[in-house]
């Protein structure tokens, strides 16, 4: 019952936000694009063009960075003992982000173009990032998320019925979207688990633990101007906490490693 009440409170908060922003709610939704990096890495060009089908917009990424992403992914897969498709996406731009999950084609990991630009040629930071996403898969966080989603759906149906009785237009659709947004996000405890397991994957694969510290130093700088209500900031541990956690992990897992505060490569 307590879980149901928490779900209702979160849905009500999201509903209030949507009612306050009718113009944004009415805007046409642009779906994100995903490009298979295993295919892209075959290019012999110095820069690879990724064209967005609906708008024709082109993302340019250096071939060396694509090759490095695929190489690091292969190393992480060996230590995590998990196979997944690797994608570049424009989802979440302009802020750096990455995601993982399972679909009809199996497990996948996607890194957006802003994250690729942020990390540059720092293979250790990329290993921490991909290790984190593979940890979500290994720890079956998606299964736990789907269980939360079932609770959100039940709560959303109840709330939709109540709002419909009160005469609120599109009540069912709005509460359905609210439940979807909530259930898709990993919670902060799951993010902490993935940070630690992901760091272990990276170190086991031969990458420096200090890469995780650089990753979150760069992320904190980049997200300093992100909207406070953004989904990334709402579902992830606070930046300062995460950076301290990564420093502690680096010292514990690889005490003789390069100083954690080393400048990104």
Image (tube, rainbow, N blue to C red):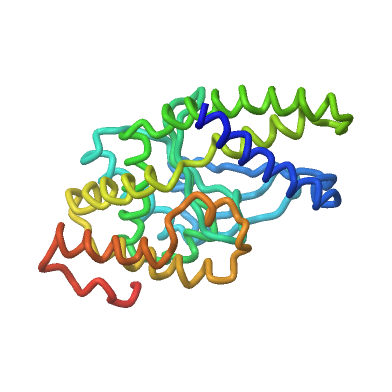
Percent from the top left, x then y, of residue 3?
A: 51, 31
Task: Tell which of 249 and 211 is nearer to you.
Answer: 249
Whether residue 13 sits left or right of residue 242 in the image: it is right
Quarter of the image holding residue 212? bottom left
* In the foreground, 201 or 56: 201
Relative to 15, is 203 on the left or the right?
Answer: left
Q: Quadrant of residue 160?
A: top right
Residue 97 left/right relative to 263: right
Vertical arrangement, residue 167 with respect to residue 244, above or below: above
What's the residue at 47%, 32% (across, down)?
Answer: 145
Residue at (30% x, 66% y) in the render: 244
Image x and y of residue 165, in percent: 84, 24
Give residue 87's position: percent from left, percent from top: 49, 43
Q: Is residue 141 left or right of residue 51?
A: left
Number of numbered markers: 0
Picture layout, residue 112 above or below residue 154: below
- Classify 47 as above or below 109: below
Q: Residue at 46%, 53% (x, y): give it.
A: 236
| Viewer can see residue 208 | no
Residue 226 screen position, x and y as percent: 59, 65
Q: Pick the residue in front: 183 or 215.
A: 183
Q: Tell me if residue 174 can be seen.
A: yes
Quarter of the figure with residue 161:
top right
| Nearer to me, 178 or 218 | 178
The relative height of residue 50 versus residue 186 in the rendered view (above or below) is: below
Work out which quarter of the rendered image holds the C terminus and state it: bottom left
């Amino acid at each position: 019952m307590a879980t149901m009440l928490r779900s209702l409170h979160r849905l009500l908060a999201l509903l209030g936000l949507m009612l306050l922003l009718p113009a944004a709610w009415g805007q046409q939704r642009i779906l994100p694009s995903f490009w298979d990096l295993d295919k892209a890495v075959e290019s012999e060009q110095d820069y690879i063009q990724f064209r967005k089908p609906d708008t024709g917009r082109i993302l340019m990424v250096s071939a060396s960075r694509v090759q490095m992403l695929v190489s690091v992914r292969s190393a992480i897969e060996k230590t995590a003992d998990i196979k997944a498709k690797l994608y570049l996406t424009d989802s979440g731009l302009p802020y750096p982000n990455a995601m993982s999950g399972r679909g009809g084609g199996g497990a996948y990991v996607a890194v957006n173009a802003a994250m690729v630009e942020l990390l540059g040629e720092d293979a250790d930071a990329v290993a921490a990032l991909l290790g984190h996403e593979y940890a979500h898969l290994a720890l079956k966080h998606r299964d736990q998320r789907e269980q939360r989603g079932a609770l959100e759906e039940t709560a959303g149906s109840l709330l939709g019925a109540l709002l419909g009785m009160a005469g609120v237009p599109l009540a069912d659709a709005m509460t359905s979207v609210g439940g979807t947004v909530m259930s898709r996000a990993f919670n902060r405890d799951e993010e902490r688990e993935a940070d630690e397991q992901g760091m272990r994957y990276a170190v086991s694969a031969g990458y420096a633990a200090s890469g995780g510290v650089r990753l979150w130093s760069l992320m904190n700088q980049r997200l300093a101007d992100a909207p406070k209500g953004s989904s990334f900031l709402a579902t992830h541990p606070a930046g300062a906490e995460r950076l301290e956690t990564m420093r502690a992990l680096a010292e514990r897992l690889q005490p003789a490693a390069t100083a954690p505060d080393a400048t990104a490569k």
